[in-house]
Image (cartoon, rainbow, N blue to C red):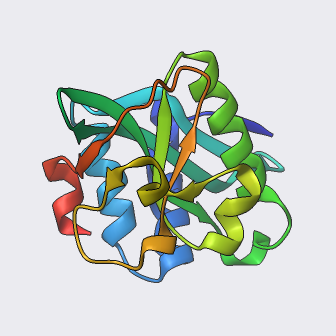
Amino acid sequence: MIRCENLLDASAIYNVHTQAFERENEAQLVKNIRHSDRYIPQLSLVAEVNNTVVGHILFSYIDLVGEETLRVLSLAPLAVVPKFQRQGIGSALVQAGLETADTMGEALVIVLGHPQFYLRFGFQPSVNYGIELPFPVPEDVFMVKLLTNYQGFKGKVVYPPAFQEV
């Protein structure tokens, strides 16, 4: 079952990220974003199995600075407890989040991740759309998914302070 996170999920979400990444950076990122003006409650989703939170995905606002500064979505982080990985839970979270974001009228989603995973959801290298990376990483891992309201936006991605600890 996939649903929006609630106040009682915070520690379970922290544990999901800590287990999945074997460090606290991503769990701390969720906490930082949750306490910022970039947090979007409808786009913080959990996956449950037998009433236990086993996965989490967070979409939050970042800036795309071009002719004007636009708020666009970042997909980060995504985690599934190791015992439940490779069972389609992460894919279901991504799909649910993208559908919700599109329904909300968002224009695009940016992710830094494994191309083999994200290409299946329609993500493409951001440079194909004139969206510049904010730091040096291989172009194929910095991707964008265009949603219904995309209107040719271009510029450089600027992450808010919540991301600086990751």
> What quarter of the picture does the N terminus occupy?
top right
> Compared with residue 12, is residue 104 higher up or lower down, i.e. above or below?
above
Is residue 123 left or right of 65 when viewed as pictured?
right
> What quarter of the picture does the C terminus occupy?
bottom left
Residue 76 in sight: no
Q: Position of residue 97 (x, y in %)?
A: 63, 37
* Rendered image quadrant of residue 102: top right
**Residue at the spot 56% in from the left edge and 75% down from the top edge:** 20
Q: Position of residue 19 (x, y in %)?
A: 54, 76
**Residue at the spot 13% in from the left edge and 51% down from the top edge:** 161
* Rendered image quadrant of residue 133: bottom left
**Residue at the spot 69% in from the left edge and 61% down from the top edge:** 119
> Compared with residue 78, is residue 67 higher up or lower down, i.e. above or below?
above
Q: Position of residue 38 (x, y in %)?
A: 28, 33
Residue 86 in sight: yes
**Residue at the spot 32% in from the left edge and 71% down from the top edge:** 25
Total marks placed: 0
Residues 31 and 124: in front is: 124
* Rendered image quadrant of residue 154: top left
Residues 3 and 158: in front is: 158
Is residue 53 left or right of 149 when viewed as pictured?
right
